Image: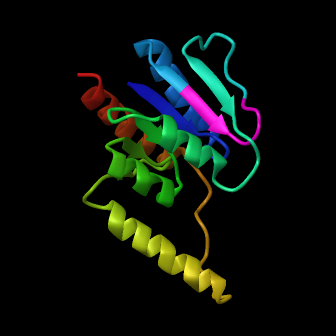
Amino acid sequence: MKIWIDADAAPTPVKEVVFRAAARLSLETILVANTPQSKPAAATTVRAVTVRSGADQADRYIVAQSQPGDLVITADIPLASLLVEKGVSVVDPRGEEYHQGNIASRLSMRNFLDELRGTGTPTGGAAPYGPKDKKLFAATFDRLLSRLTR
């Protein structure tokens, strides 16, 4: 089992939670991004992969390299959809697990809002990432880790 982080937009508190768990459980963790990512010097199980610039390059890399039984952290719903279809566990930085039972509706809503934005209709944005989000992420992440490492 590996942990993958779609790292360009992952909040620092999410990375910190993952790094602690990776060290505790000796799990290989890969940060994938279009820009160089830093990791703690002592994080021997964590590595960073920088993909070339361009739309969805990090997503393509994660889809190609991940395997069923891996865990991916991403807020990118189209990426999550591809991963769920592949049998990969997915959680977003705010603690929502994406799975067969909810990914189609999440993708549909995302596409609908994207169409609205395309027409110039304001749709608002995500609230700033805060302590409640970190707590929800940590709880879901721990539950998924327990299930996947059994």
47 versus 57 height, above or below: above
Residue 138 falls in image quadrant: top left
Residue furthest front in the image? 64
119 versus 137 height, above or below: below
Q: Is residue 43 left or right of residue 55?
A: left
Which residue sits at x=25%, y=31%? 147
Q: Nearer the viewer, residue 59 or 123?
A: 59
- Find out whether residue 31 is within the magenta segment: yes
Q: Nearer the viewer, residue 54 or 20?
A: 54
Residue 122 in view here:
no
Could you say where residue 117 lies in the image, as x and y percent from the top left? 63, 81
Could you say where residue 137 lies in the image, as x and y percent from the top left? 44, 42
- Name the quadrant of the N terminus: top left
Which residue sits at x=63%, y=40%? 7
Which residue sits at x=27%, y=56%? 100
- Name the quadrant of the C terminus: top left
Residue numbers of the magenta segment: 30-37
Could you say where residue 75 lies in the image, as x and y percent from the top left? 52, 53
- Find out whether residue 136 is within the magenta segment: no
